[in-house]
Image: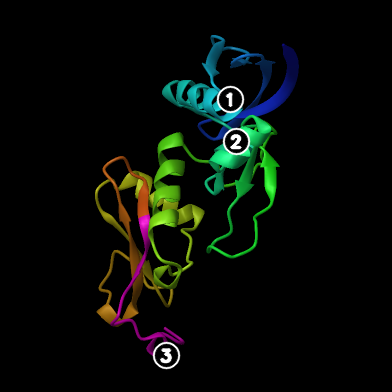
Amino acid sequence: MTTESLTVPVRVGDQFAVGRLGVEVGDRVRLSLDLEGHDPVGAEGADVLDALTGLRRQVEDAGGLLWVNGARRNVHASGMLREARGGRLAYVLPERPTPEQPETTDVLVGAAPDADVVSCAEQQRWFDAYRGVPEQARSGRRPTPREVAEARDNPGAWVYVIAGGRDPDGEVPPEAIEGAWKVGPDGVILGDFVENPHYRPSEQAGS
């Protein structure tokens, strides 16, 4: 068995804290997280990614996010890569599928403070959409942090993108709406940006 101890960020609300991540790799993988002021949590799995998913879910249940590369929205490992590297490495998928092999990242390394770290469920939804929608049908547009926050406050609704700096609470003509994001019942944006066919960018200049 091999053991390792890493320092990793954990986000709780708007604040970051530093936790100690213990890694034990044998016939199975066990991950444990110690964070000051919180009860220790741990998870076991067939490989590193399997154990990491279990650990992330426990942190999410406590109201936090484990801020590591493996929790970034567009990080995913193929079965072949997981088998070859024990789930320690995963691909960083580009915005649109390409013929080139994506770069890889260590899933247990702490992510940058501004990284697009998401919950397990949101990461899986993103990958399902990425895998299931043909490249030519994808707009390539990603929600901004403001739009993600607005979605969180409006579960089951739509987040509209309005051009020209118009007040979204005022009267907005259809041609000023660029499009919208569908929001799921848990406040998470679903799928791709839906463009408004009636949007007229030329008419919004100077608005």
Residue 112 visible to the viewer: no
Mark 1: few/some/many CA within 10 Å (<14, 14-19, 20+): many
Q: Earlier in the sequence, mark 1 or mark 2?
A: 1
Q: CA distance from mark 3 to mark 2?
A: 49 Å
Name the quadrant of the C terminus.
bottom left
Q: Quadrant of residue 153?
A: top left
Q: Which residues are magenta?
A: 191-207
The kind of secondary structure element at disc 2 is helix
Whether the magenta-drawn stretch holds residue 204 is answered as yes
Q: Is residue 106 left or right of residue 194?
A: right
Q: Which mark is residue 47?
A: 1
Question: Residue drawn 45% across and 35% down?
Answer: 120
Question: Residue drawn 55% across and 13% down?
Answer: 42
Q: Is residue 147 above or below residue 174?
A: above
Q: Residue 168: where, in percent of width, then height?
A: 32, 66
Give 135 or 165, whichever is nearer the viewer.
Answer: 135
Q: Which residue is mark 3?
A: 202
Q: Of the residues shown, which amino acid type is indicated by label 2?
A: Arg
Q: Is residue 66 above or below residue 198?
A: above
Q: Quadrant of residue 5?
A: top right
Q: Are marks 1 and 2 in contact (CB under 8 Å)?
A: yes
Q: CA distance from mark 1 to mark 2?
A: 8 Å
Q: Which mark is residue 132?
A: none
Q: Which residue is mark 2?
A: 82
